Amino acid sequence: MDQVKRAVIAGAGIGGLTAALALAKQGVEVVMCEQSSQLGEVGAGLQISPNASRVLIKLGLADALTSKVFEPAYASIRDYRSGEYYLRAPLGKEAEFRYRAPYWHLHRADLHAVLVEACRSAGVKIQLNAEVSGYRQEQDKVVLLLTDGQSVSGDLLIGADGIRSAVRTQLLGPEKPSFMGQVAWRGVISVDDLAMKIEPEACVWAGPGKHLVTYYLRGGRDVNFVAVEERSDWRSESWREEGDIQQLRRAFADWHPQVTELLGAAKSSFLWSLNGRAELSTWHNKRVVLLGDACHPMLPFMAQGAAMSIEDAYVLADQLSQYDVPIALMNYEAIRKPRATKIQQMSAANAGLYHMHGGVLGKAKLKAMQLATSIAPKIVQSKLDFVYGHDVIG
Ligand SMILES: Cc1cc2nc3c(=O)[nH]c(=O)nc-3n(C[C@H](O)[C@H](O)[C@H](O)COP(=O)(O)OP(=O)(O)OC[C@H]3O[C@@H](n4cnc5c(N)ncnc54)[C@H](O)[C@@H]3O)c2cc1C
């Protein structure tokens, strides 16, 4: 028997922590190595759709999370100037009934803190200041190597170390992620700073070459925004920097008053370059396996990056609970790669829709969606069902 007894995880982001928790609950000893000096997450929101919330609930996190979520009533797409609705699909209780799990908006820091707390209670060891440089595979174990010269061994290494994964680099060779020609500002505004009320929906404001996503967080006390703009270059070496609020306001100056008022109340933001990768040839080798952004980073235009890492984590732990390491890793890749790749492609395709590519034709596509929603809602619904209805628990 070659079942996993001790797993080492590179990276304590949302994917790595979910995998750690799922494995620890199965009795596996888990050690995590995180490069940061302290645990935490940037101030921004996350949409956790039912395909991911069902996993968090299954892992016992419902009580800890429900006081921190906001449940949107609709998923909407609106015109950047007129505010006309191209899409208004019900979420809330209707989605919960349809998908047997809720649609949540969560602050990343809240989800991260709940996962860390649950991992620690389940006995997971989290080493901070532990930057991974690579690994060494031996006959019946794998040794994770840290930049300070230390090492940690186990019978499995999970590379959950994000888009610039050191584990991926060693597994498949060096290759930088590619800039996707888009930047995103992210920020959170307290409702106390807003003179107006926004709708209780996950709303995409679609406009030429740009879009803005808005939604409530923390029971409606905060509003999250993600503003995306197409750009041909990104000069900074860093992929995240303090955003210039004036520049952000100028970029959306001629948009609907709800958008300009909202951005007028923003006090700070972070600016991200959005990067991606082509589909990898494989996600595993012997005792080393990748999950989350380490193997399938995606444009955030379906709000599925973290959700996919949560699905990955559950499937990986589930396969490891049933099979020896080589079979479990093979099954995991066979189950997860087609779905993650499809969602990666669907996310990239949404750039064209949200940014009205093709001018008049671009707007016509949104109009066609508006028509389809009213005369054949099942077509639009089936696209959402594929994403939100997926059940990795079975
Ligand atoms: C603008 C924007 C909006 C988004 N909105 C959503 C959304 O609404 N819903 C959603 O589901 N997803 C969303 N995403 C995507 C989501 O944020 C990511 O897909 C998700 O965080 C990936 O999780 P992960 O655990 O794989 O990687 P990460 O969150 O990147 O975690 C990787 C961890 O590994 C650590 N690490 C990295 N290198 C090393 C090393 N060498 N040694 C040790 N540790 C290391 C990092 O410090 C980090 O803690 C969004 C992304 C962006 C950019």
Image (cartoon, rainbow, N blue to C red):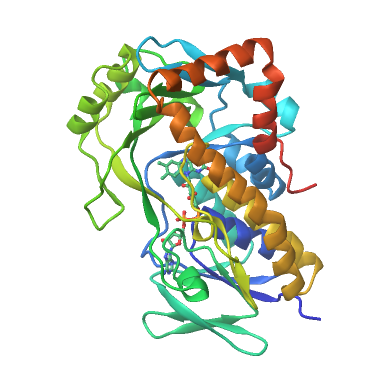
- Which corner quadrant of the image does residue 103 belong to? top right
Where residue 208 sits in the image (x, y, percent)? Answer: 35, 24
- Please, is residue 97 above or below residue 293 in the view? above
Using residue 90 as the reference point, say whether residue 226 is left or right of it. left
Residue drawn at point x = 38 percent, y = 9 percent:
82
Say which of 103 and 352 sits in front: 352
- Which corner quadrant of the image does residue 250 belong to? top left
Using residue 133 as the reference point, say whether residue 325 is left or right of it. right
Residue 25 in view here:
no
Say which of 292 and 87 sits in front: 87
- Please, is residue 187 above or below residue 119 in the view? above
Residue 85 in view here:
yes
- Please, is residue 246 above or below residue 392 in the view? above
Residue drawn at point x = 61 percent, y = 62 percent:
20
Q: How many marks?
A: 0
For the N terminus, the quadrant is bottom right
Where residue 66 sits in the image (x, y, percent)? Answer: 60, 35
- Please, is residue 324 above or below residue 138 in the view? above
Where residue 291 sits in the image (x, y, percent)? Answer: 57, 60
Where residue 88 sits in the image (x, y, percent)? Answer: 56, 16
Residue drawn at point x = 25 percent, y = 36 percent:
268
